[in-house]
Image: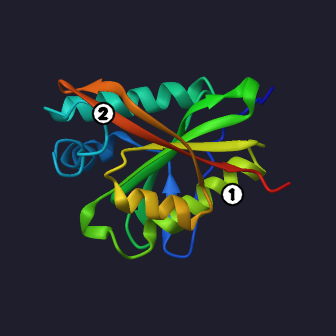
Amino acid sequence: MLNPNFNPFPVLITEQLILRRFTVEDAADLFEMRSDETVMRYIHRPISKTVDDAFALIGVIDELIGKNDGITWCICLKNSDKYIGSIGFWRIEKQNHRAEIGYLLNPAFQGRGLMQEAMAAAVNYGFNVLLLHSVEARVSPDNVASIKLLLKNKFVQEAYFKEDHLFNGDFEDTLVYTLLTQN
């Protein structure tokens, strides 16, 4: 069984990015992203209504980190401490050495290869530090950019669930992509 320990919090550094722990100072930028219907189109979570929703989400992230049950990094450019996105393993199945990865990037920063850098750093951490055997991503079949990112990182489609969940009154499909460790 996996025994992750996120204390001290692992800061990841790439060529252009710093992946760090969320702080309450990130709440306004997090709220801006999570209240934007275009940004949240493929994230099947309620739209944030107030900045308090962002504070609550940071609280949930901190709780998962504190229990070593999940980890989410705040993505920042190296020359700035401003939140531009997030990536993390929010559901870690310790008994199965498997985790689900999720990510979100401000549209103003998309198309620059930044999420590719964040993905490579997070997956490397997952396999080489957490000692995961597999990483799973669940995406909407309509989320072409996310699917391209997963394929670029050698994830393989494992499943296509038809109308497997109800969101905002509609039954929606889910694709499951998986990457296995290369040990």
Q: Using the image, tell me which numbered label, if any, was put on residue 172.
A: 2
Q: Is residue 111 above or below residue 91?
A: below
Furthest residue to the right? 183
**Could one spot residue 73 in this view of the protein?**
no
* Residue 81, image x, y percentages: 38, 61
User: For numbered disc 1, what is the local secondary structure?
Assistant: helix
Q: Using the image, tell me which numbered label, if any, was put on residue 124.
A: 1
| Foreground pick, 40 / 140 | 140
* Residue 13, image x, y percentages: 58, 65
Amino acid type, mark 2: Glu
Count neighbours of disc 2 (C-alpha within 10 A) and say few if under 14, some if 14 to 19, many if 20 or more. some
On screen, residue 95 versus residue 7, left or right, reads right
**Could one spot residue 120 in this view of the protein?**
yes
* Residue 171, image x, y percentages: 27, 28
Q: Is residue 48 above or below residue 141?
A: above
Amino acid type, mark 1: Asn
Q: Give the image quarter of residue 91.
A: top right
Q: Residue at x 23, y 49 (%)?
A: 33
Q: Residue at x 70, y 43 (%)?
A: 134
User: For numbered disc 2, what is the local secondary structure?
Assistant: strand
Q: First in sequence: mark 2 or mark 1?
A: 1
Q: Residue at x 62, y 62 (%)?
A: 154
On screen, residue 2 versus residue 160, left or right, reads right
* Residue 20, image x, y percentages: 51, 52
Q: Is residue 86 above or below residue 148?
A: above
Q: Marks 2 and 1, Cα distance to the nearest angstrom?
A: 31 Å
Instruction: Verify CB contact (< 8 Å) between mark 2 and mark 1.
Output: no
